[in-house]
Image (cartoon, rainbow, N blue to C red):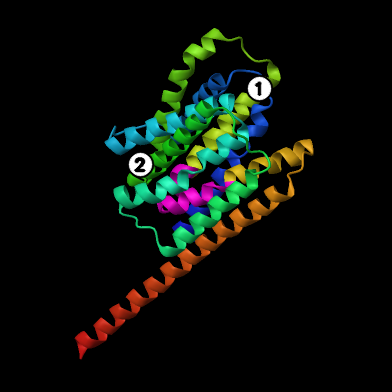
Amino acid sequence: MKFETKATIALACSALLWSTGGLFIKLVDWNSVSIAGSRSFIASFVLLVHLKKPKPDFSRPQIAAAFSSACAMIFYVLANKMTTAANTILLQYTAPVYVAILAWIILKEKPTFDNWIALFIIMSGMVLFFSEKLSTGNMYGNIIAVFSGLALAFFTVFMRMQKGKSSYESFYLAHIITFLISIPFIIRSSFPDTSGWLGIFALGIFQTGFASLLFAYGIKYIPALKAVFIMTLEPILNPLWVFIFTGEAPGIYAIIGGIIIISAVLFTTAYSSQRKRIIQKKKGGAYETGRKSSTT
């Protein structure tokens, strides 16, 4: 199996794990920042087990990725407190738009025509998916949700910039930063009950820890924009878990929007892989032609 295929699967599995957040958070009766910090604290140990001896290089991309990730996590939980969950997720997942621009400028990964088409289709599907639950909400909460999306975009680009050299350490630092920010909130509040702690450990180990490992692996081999396309599976998988465990069925627009998003992600993944194979074949053909002409 090629590295790109493995990376695509890893990112899809990461989105799958991240999507369980809403389900596990329901088990925890605690303020959002404390939940974010405590799950990051546990996730840091998952990464520590994998890394054994973390060796952060504290390069600019690594520090930028760590702070961007911490900001995305903190902004996300703050926005959830100040506006509706649907508003928060939709506005956070405007990230592909920012990634398309930032990856072009910073990484020189110019979006192709099919990338722009996929971007338009995915964003249209997102709006349709959340149309039944969208509201004007709290203006400040909506603004914070937009910043969450911007932070997520910067995080994706800076992770890609490292080309896998220290992507695991970037996540490790991000979780440490998130935990440090949450300490005042944890100290000032009462601790959750037993079921709450079970939810926090599930969030820390699976929803955040393992997901971080998978994302750090996948982003090494996948362009930033394609990676964030795959991650848009997270918000549409979230209601699936709710439906399975609580029986709360999504509306017809949500189902149609979800089908559109999944179709667009599958199309752009398959099309980019096919295009890459064609380019490689042409290069191989040119190489063989060059060899023949050089021997005559």
- Residue lying at 28% horizontally and 84% vertically, measured from the top left: 289
Q: What residue is shown with label 2?
A: 158
Residue 108: numbered disc: none
Between 225 and 84, the residue placed more toward the observer is 84
Would you identify the image quadrant in which residue 283 lies? bottom left
Number of residues whose C-alpha sits closer than 10 Å to that of mark 2, classed few (under 14), some (14–19) or many (20 or more): many
Q: Is residue 96 left or right of residue 258?
A: left
Tell me if label 2 and label 1 are in contact, CB under 8 Å.
no
Distance from disc 2 to disc 1, alpha carbons, whole Å, reads 32 Å
Q: Secondary structure at mark 2?
A: helix
Would you identify the image quadrant in which residue 199 lies? top right
**Residue interval drawn in magenta:** 215-233
Query: Residue 124, can we see it?
Result: yes
Q: Is residue 105 left or right of residue 253?
A: left
Q: Which kind of residue does numbered mark 2 sit on?
A: Phe
Residue 183, x across and y down, in percent: 48, 14
Residue 116, x across and y down, in percent: 45, 58
Residue 200, x across and y down, in percent: 61, 24
Looking at marks 2 and 1 on the same chain, the residue that comes earlier in the sequence is marked by: 1
Magenta-drawn stretch contains 37: no
Classify 78 as above or below 168.
Answer: above
- Residue lying at 53% horizontally and 13% vertically, measured from the top left: 186
Q: Secondary structure at mark 1?
A: loop
- Residue lying at 20% horizontally and 91% vertically, measured from the top left: 296
> What secondary structure predominates along the stretch shown in magenta?
helix
Q: Which kind of residue does numbered mark 1 sit on?
A: Val
Magenta-drawn stretch contains 231: yes
Q: What residue is shown with label 1?
A: 28
